[in-house]
Image: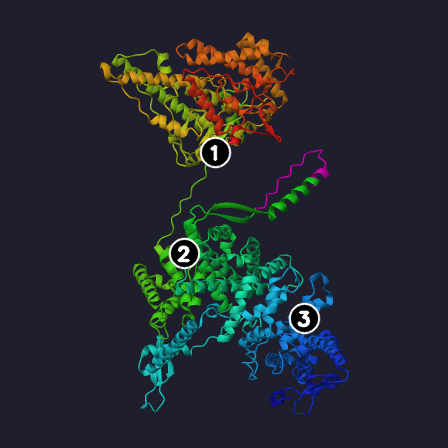
Amino acid sequence: MSDQEIGLEAHHLFDKAQTVDPEVRAHVYSLVTALGGTEADEAGSYVLGDDALACLRDLKRWLKLYDEKNNRLDVARCLAEANLVNGDLLPILAAWTEDSNNNRAKARLALACLELLVPLTWPLEHAGGMTVNHHRHTPYIQQAHVRYKAGTLCYGRASILRTIVRIGLPSIATSKDDRTSRDEGIIKLMLYFFRNISIITPLPNLPSQGLDDEISRSATIEAFRQQDVFALLLTMCSNMGEDFNLQDVIVLEIIFNLIKGVNVEKLFMNEEQRKIQKTTELKDVLGKERAMHRDYAKIAPTRHGRFGTMIWVKREDEKVSAISGQDNLKDGRNSLLKMDKSKKWSKPQQRRKDLDHSIYDFDHSVPLTADASELLRNFVEEFLDSGFNPLFTHLRKAIEREADRLLDINYRQFFYTVSWFLQAEKCRRARQEKDRKNQKVQTDFEAESYGLVAAVLNQETFITLNRYMQTSFDNKEWQDLNASMRCFTQILLTVQEMAQSSLEEDQEIADNIQNRIFYEETTHDRIVNILKGYKDQGFGYLDACTELSHVFLRMLERYSKENADLQIRSRRRARRKKKEQQTTQNGENEEADDDDDDVRSENEDIAEAAQVSRERKFDFTRFAAKFTSQSSVNTLVAFTAFYRDLSIDQLKRAHRFFYRVAFKQELAVLLFRVDIIALFYQLIKGPEGLDRSNAMYKEWDELVRQVLKKMFKKLEQRPELIVEMLFSKIRATLYYLEYGHERQTVSSTRTPAELEVKAAPDRDVNEQIGIVVAALLKDDKESFVRWVLETIAKAADERKAWDAEATARRELSGIATEPHEETTAAEKGDDKPGPKAPSIVIRPPTDEIRTATFKDAKLKLLMTLSGFERSGGEEKADATWIMPSAVSSTSLEELHITIEKYLGTMWTDPSGQEPENFLRRVKTTTAAAYAEDGEQEPRRDAFIDDSEGSDDLQDFMFPDNVRSKSDALTQLKKKHKKPKLRTKNNVEPLAEDELDERRKAREQAALDRRRKIKSELYIRDSDEEMDEEENRAFFAREEENRRKQAQRVMAALSLGRTEEGAATKKEKKRKSESIEEGNEKRRRRNDSEDERMSGIEDEIEMMEAESASSPRHRAATSDDELDIEDTPLSSQSQASNAGSGKDVALREIAPPRLNSSAMAKGQEADDRDDSDDELPVLASQRRRVRAGFILDDSDED
């Protein structure tokens, strides 16, 4: 053993007899002795024992059966003390030269040595579950590992690493299909040894052995390059997934241990840049030293101060504190600072892992020599060109399926390695761009695509990364979260570079990636929560989370400005369904109830576990407000506290955040806290402040000055704010502290649902009022009904008085009219006989009734049926109800009698149903909603005729000026063409009165024409609302009405059925002729009697066609039949189905939802009625059907 090893043994605290069982030590030492030894000659060559191979195998059994089985380290300790690796194994490997490759005995010895080297160099780390034996032997074995690595890398007579590569080459050269388990084991042993060598580093908590340079990262990189380890790794990475499957994790660990802690920017510097960087770093260090001497010179003792000094400093309440030192005599501020430094607070420390000494830590920077940097940069460039995509694609797939070979630490290594190589790719591109500019290369070269790193820029990687980030955050695995945050940051920066690329393909990919990343609101919330959740996870974690939030916020702000319509998806847990009330009736089957309960319980569980997703427009201001919280400020304050060690980019990162909080979000009050203000002041004014020569000093100086200016202004306005400077700010009082008053919030009351009475035959307005009154009485709201009754009575008296006054005024003026003419004029709202009656404003007497007029749907329905209207037609809580002038006093008296009748005798249904069953909600979708989407399709239940005998058909007519988008521009041009007035040949232009009369005539003609259009738009299918008895009663009444209307209907419809064979060819021809005749009659508008008869014929034809309007037939009705013909749609259906030979029962016609093109065609037909051209008659044509789907003309546009 060497003198150094002997000294190490001498200083060990434990005697050999006390640390290891003497029998175990004797057995192990005897095997090491029998293995071989060094000759005593000058050459000192190693000589093997008689049975060296058996000795190596016995040592392997001792390690496996004693140490591993008993969870001890005794055999490994004995082998370290016996210097087996450096004294025996390495000489045996060196003896196997390249000339003796065919020597099978030496090859077997070399493989046996490798089988011992792997467990002897396996990394050890303090972890949970360690025994006393582990704690006793681990420090010694860790120091032995340092000697093993030094001997392996610096063995003078041979290249040990190349020899290890030669051991595995035969197995590597064998194809994957032909490899045996032994070949796979040899490859794994070789890679594990390289992994162990790359991991071994001198630990700071153990005494140094003077081998730091021999086992440094630079020495490892140079040895790996010179002894072909890098070439082996590149070969395996580029063929990962093809020739190698199970080796990906071990290769990842080797690469991770080679690159962790290496500064990527320095790695890709050339020699000149590296010199400048070293000069700059030296200048910064000297500047810090000068500043330290300058601060010390202010308080340094003089040559005349021969005696010590102790002074008392007076504090509040006549208390004093003793401070020693003459420097306290010069400045009172320095005395207070020294008092602060003397204070001690034993803050309770939480138990956490010692991350600083972990072999998997990647936050500590590792310096490299110039040669090592050059070699590593070459390896990185070759790896990016050939091995990046295959390796990380294979690893990502293994992570997705959670392969057994993956350990928890491998996830962290994967994401950190990805982030490191993405940063390396970015630095390489920046260096290449700079070299091209310096060398003045042609500028029209084709930029390189980002396909070299495309394996980690796909959706699968984003899903894996987001899941791992959330899991690490939830489980508080801070180092794992640190690695994933670095990976996410580098992905964002890479995507940002891709967006600025000159290749259009890269730009499209970058836009797609940004859209996917920013689409999920859970990603936004995760970034905010990570920033808020910092506590004491270390500076590396703090740097990673602040950088991620800074990059994410800036990129999202830029992307949201470029994409104003950015949509994001928010996810939330679905609310648990309310448990349905169980109604058990007498005689119900209990087993059926149990089955229903089981189904209901299962549905509730599914609904509880499901997530509801919805999209909404992204608001960046709302998202940025999440960052401006006190927790986020605390994180950045903790980061800024390291300002003396921060780089320019890190200082800029903190500066931008505080600027956003104070000025962009206008929440500077978050910074008004004593410790934050003290930190800002110290950063600028000192002592030990930011160097004035720093590039960020001026920006920080201006920021601090503006923040202090705001603070003093707030203190002048509200002096009590100084008390709040001692505490953190909470969201509840933040607005008040900033603006001096509480936030004014206006709560908008939701408009309640509108009700209507279900339509039924012979159900007039009086019966509808009775139903509503009965429903109110059932709800114990008789007071509301009586208030309506009293209001109608007062309105009737007021309207009577006004009528009397108006009559007297007309008599005095000589224009008295007959009483029945007055009533008619008042009902029609005609202002020619005299002024209209003023509207009567309804004023509820109590707040309860005022609230009910807005919230109680039944009361609102009663008021609407009684003739009340809202002022302005707006649905607001403070909307005023009025009695319009169109309602006469006679109508009010009739309403009063009707309500009073049903108030005394409540309306009841003959079948015994409750009044609420006859009420339903009014659907809110209107034609205006479709118009917003560019459609012209009216709502199915937009028009419901409750009274068949009503003369007010204005609301039930076909929509005016319905046209599609295709002819909108043409119609607009026609509209803007003004008619030219002829003034030649002394022809005078028409007078205003004549023009007005012609305009009214045209409007009246258009009104009459629309009234005659019978469209399926306004026919509603109400089969589901009536049972069979009601249907029979309905058809019976319809049959009676038809008999009264015309004898022709009686012949066509007998007991609700059509005669067989009615639809013959002759009848079709007659219908076609009637259609042409009807069109011709409509063109001759001066003959009003013909128009009236044509309208009657159209109505009769529609009734005849009701028998053919079954659901199956309606589904097959062609939209093309709406183009020109003014005959009803139902008539066309009847014509197409004529001659079927089947009796079809009558039923209501359900309106199909018409598209905008069909409505436009209907409008074009109306426009063509005004022309003199003859309209062709369209024959009935069958609907085109493909694969069971009906094809409209709009489908082919």
Q: Residue 700 placed where, x, y %? A: 35, 66
For the residues marked 2 and 3, what is the alpha-carbon distance in whole angstroms?
69 Å
Q: Residue 103 placed where, x, y %? A: 73, 77
- Count of numbered badges drawn on the protein: 3
The answer to whether 577 appears left or right of 427 in the picture is: right
Label 1 residue SS:
loop
In magenta, the rendered stretch is 575-594
Vertical arrangement, residue 471 with respect to residue 1122, above or below = below
Q: Main secondary structure of the magenta part?
A: loop
For the residue pair 515 and 326, the one nearer the viewer reads as 515
The answer to which of marks 3 and 1 sits earlier in the sequence is: 3
Q: Are marks 1 and 2 in contact (CB under 8 Å)?
A: no
- The three-letter code of the residue at mark 1 reads Asp
Residue 348 shows up from this direction: no
Residue position marked by numbered label 2 in the rendering: 733
Pick out the residue farthest to the top: 1047
| Residue located 63% across and 18% down the image | 1144
For the residues marked 3 and 1, what is the alpha-carbon distance in whole angstroms?
86 Å
The answer to whether 402 appears left or right of 343 in the picture is: right
- The three-letter code of the residue at mark 3 reads Gly
Label 3 residue SS:
helix
- The three-letter code of the residue at mark 2 reads Thr
The answer to whether 289 appears left or right of 1151 in the picture is: left
Residue position marked by numbered label 1 in the rendering: 856
Q: Residue 928 placed where, x, y %? A: 44, 32
Q: Of the residues tagged 1 and 2, which is closer to the observer? A: 2
